[in-house]
Image: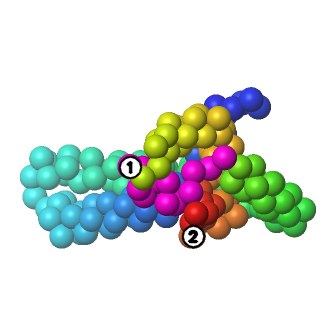
Amino acid sequence: MTRGKGKVKEILSTTEREVLQGERRELQDALKNEYGVGTSAQQIDKDKIKKQIDNIDRAIADREPPKVRGAEKDAMAKESERIEEELREGMPTRDEMRYPVRNPGAVRKHMNWDKRNSEKIERYRYIQRVLNPDDPRSVENLRKDK
């Protein structure tokens, strides 16, 4: 994903991290329980599994959120608040999204809003994953009821 200032590091969501960690556990269990005994074919499988575990470890490490402290964290929180206010402007309400038949033009309104704000949405998601890696806020939380 690229933006005006170059590439932005993609951060794992909580679900993505849990899935990768689950895959890692399964591979480790397979390594302990089934492989490494006897034939050379089993030894090849063992090496392949170890490489897969290393790849998962690398993927998790490369996509962990950066550690932020102090002034940088405050600045990101302030930027998040500013982006929240900007995203709320023109954002279709929950009612419009839930019942588009009752709200003619709601789908088009959402598509236009999404197109106009795609960079802000991506930045907001990034900030939320950095500040709250275990429970980032969703853009959907910004939607008004009516």
**Could you tell me the amino acid type at mark 1?**
Val
Tell me the quarter of the picture where residue 71 sits. bottom right
Element class at badge 1: loop
Q: What residue is at 32 percent from the left and 60 percent from the top?
A: 23
Q: Identify the disc placed on residue 101.
A: 1
Tell me the quarter of the picture where residue 132 sits. bottom right
Residue 90: percent from left, percent from top? 66, 46
Which one is in front, 45 or 129? 129
Residue 143: percent from left, percent from top? 59, 60
Q: Is residue 57 visible?
A: no
21 lies left or right of 60:
left
**Residue 74 is one of the magenta-drawn residues:** no
Q: Between tags 2 and 1, which lies in front?
A: 1
Marks 2,1: beta carbons within 8 A: no
Tell me the magenta residue range. 90-101
Residue to which mark 2 is pinned: 135
* Placement of the N terminus among the 4 image quadrants: top right
**Residue 99 is one of the magenta-drawn residues:** yes
83 lies left or right of 55:
right
- Compared with 33, 118 (above or below) is above
Q: What residue is at 58 percent from the left and 63 percent from the top?
A: 146
Furthest residue to the right?
Answer: 71
Spatial CA span between label 2 and label 1: 33 Å
